[in-house]
Amino acid sequence: TAVLVVAAFPMLVIGLLIRMTMGSPVLFCQERPGQGKRLFTLCKFRSMNNTRGPDGRLLPDSRRLTRLGRFLRQTSLDELPQLWNIFRGNLSLVGPRPLLPRYLPYYTERECLRFTVRPGITGWAQIHGPNPLGWDKRLGLDVWYVENWSLALDLRILLLTLGAVLTQKGMMVDVYSTGGFDLDEERGKQGKERARVESRPC
């Protein structure tokens, strides 16, 4: 609760800047599967505008990312609204990042271990950036974290995250990106046989 109070003023300032430069909405919210695959609503400060091409479709993310949005991502200030998720018990400070619900059928049986713990704002995979980090390696790092969890490991991740934010080196700028295909696209392209053998419902 105290952290939310302290963060209230910078969040208000950031919200006003987003409203002035990008308009509404100020927050970008999506449902994500957390511990036990239970869905919850995760919100971040918005970092992209809604610019569309001549065909009416949204431009690629890289072209819609604003100067303010890039700064918020580089400093991780876009993550501040997720303090509310921590307060509600949906998130931890450290843990595997919560990904999209449509990815659920594409995890291997071992990768499903990521759902045995609460997801986090930062994690073992995030401090092994920068982008791109392929899905197999990224999800493998999540599993390693679950299998080797300790309070000391969490403290190490927090310290490395702080250092990466301050120096803006060695950490993913966009924690949802691997620099290539989405998980469902990548593993879907690898064929139905792999999906049948390796990807089982968690």
Image (tube, rainbow, N blue to C red):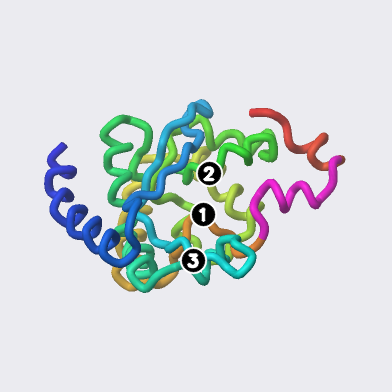
Q: Which mark is residue 11?
A: none
Q: Which residue is mark 3?
A: 51
Q: Earlier in the sequence, mark 3 or mark 2?
A: 3
Measured from the top left, where is residue 105 in percent x and y?
A: 68, 35
Does the residue at mark 2 contact the one at mark 1 (Cβ under 8 Å)?
yes
Is 192 on the left or on the right of 83, as rendered? right
- Where's residue 147, x and y in %? 52, 38
Q: Residues within 10 Å of mark 2 (few under 14, many from 20)?
A: some
Q: CA distance from mark 3 to mark 2?
A: 25 Å
In front: label 3 or label 2: 3
Q: Which mark is residue 176?
A: 1
Query: Separation of disc 2 and disc 1 at Cα?
Result: 7 Å
Q: Quick one: 98 or 133, which is closer to the camera? A: 98
Crowding near pointer 1: few (<14 within 10 Å), some, many (20+)? some
Q: Residue at x 51, y 54 (%)?
A: 176
Residue 51 in magenta stretch: no
The residue type indicated by label 3 comes to: Thr
Q: Which residues are magenta?
A: 181-192
* Inter-mark Cα distance, 1 to 3: 21 Å
Question: Quick one: quadrant of the N terminus?
Answer: top left
**Is residue 156 visible to us here?**
no
Q: Secondary structure at mark 3?
A: loop
Q: Is residue 76 visible?
A: yes
User: In what quadrant of the picture does the C terminus appear?
Assistant: top right
Magenta stretch: helix, strand or loop mostly: helix
Query: Can you give x and y, in whole percent of width and height, for residue 38 in the image?
Result: 49, 27
The residue under the point 33% across, 73% down is 167
Residue holding disc 2: 99
Q: Earlier in the sequence, mark 1 or mark 3?
A: 3
Circle 2 SS class: loop
Q: Amino acid at mark 2?
A: Leu
